[in-house]
Image (spheres, helix red, strand yellow):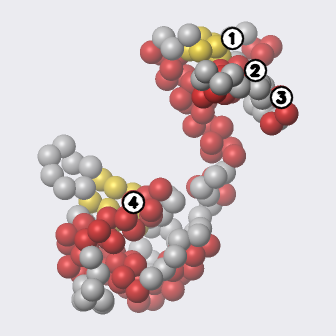
């Protein structure tokens, strides 16, 4: 990181708040510990470092914050084959539009990737290019049957991407 410890903490707090994450005293302590340590560490190590900033920080709070940071794209987890998970903050405190949670382009790429993976497994078939359309107006979505609305919705989305669920 270009900034370390206390210098970067206000920027990280602002970044978290801009994404809807509440910053409490224990969460601030965990963020400060992550910034000071710099490299990836397990939750217990982060807890010990965070307790130097706020003694009442709990392990549950550490895990909840780490999960939220990961879901928001602010942290990444390294999962070794045998051992504890290690988390670290992403290097850049700036969120690019492609990394913004809820970004439509990013979601469309994920859906397309998911459908191609389903095709490889034999659960979906690519349709002729004439049916490929990415725009999915809400008014064009089918009225779902009470039996299985999720499958109906998935089929509708797959059709918009040029696939048919098997």
Contact check, label 1 and label 2, Cβ < 8 Å: yes
Front-lying residue, 95 or 110: 110
Q: Residues within 10 Å of mark 2 (few under 14, many from 20)?
A: some
Which numbered disc flags the more N-terminal residue, 1 or 3?
Answer: 1
Distance from disc 3 to disc 2, alpha carbons, whole Å, reads 15 Å
Q: Quadrant of the N terminus?
A: bottom left
Q: Which residue is mark 1?
A: 127
Which numbered disc flags the more N-terminal residue, 1 or 2?
Answer: 1
Q: Position of residue 45 (x, y in %)?
A: 20, 72
Which numbered disc flags the more N-terminal residue, 3 or 2?
Answer: 2
Q: Which residue is mark 3?
A: 140
* Above or below, comparing residue 23 to residue 129 in the picture: below
Along the horizontal axis of the image, is 21 left or right of 157?
Answer: left
Which numbered disc flags the more N-terminal residue, 4 or 2?
Answer: 4
Measuring 78% from the left and 33% from the top, which residue is drawn there?
136
Distance from disc 1 to disc 3, alpha carbons, whole Å, reads 19 Å
Q: Tell me the mark number nearer the camera, choosing from 4 and 3.
A: 3
Judge whether residue 103 can be spotted in this image.
yes
> Helix, strand, or loop for circle 2?
loop
Q: Position of residue 155 (x, y in %)?
A: 65, 21
What label does residue 147 carry, if any? none
């Amino acid at each position: 990181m270009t900034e370390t410890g206390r210098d970067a903490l206000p920027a990280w707090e602002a970044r978290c708040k801009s994404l809807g994450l509440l910053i409490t005293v224990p969460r601030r302590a965990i963020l400060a510990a992550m910034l000071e340590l710099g490299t990836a560490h397990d939750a217990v190590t982060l807890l010990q470092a965070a307790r130097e900033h706020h003694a009442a920080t709990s392990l549950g709070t550490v895990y909840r914050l780490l999960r939220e940071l990961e879901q928001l794209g602010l942290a990444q987890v390294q999962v070794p084959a045998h051992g504890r998970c290690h988390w670290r903050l992403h290097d850049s405190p700036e969120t690019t539009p492609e990394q913004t949670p809820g970004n439509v382009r990013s979601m469309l790429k994920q859906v397309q990737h998911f459908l191609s993976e389903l095709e490889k497994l034999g659960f979906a078939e690519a349709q002729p290019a004439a049916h490929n359309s990415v725009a999915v107006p809400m008014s064009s979505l089918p009225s779902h049957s009470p039996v299985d609305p999720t499958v109906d919705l998935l089929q509708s989305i797959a059709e918009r991407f040029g696939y048919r669920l098997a």
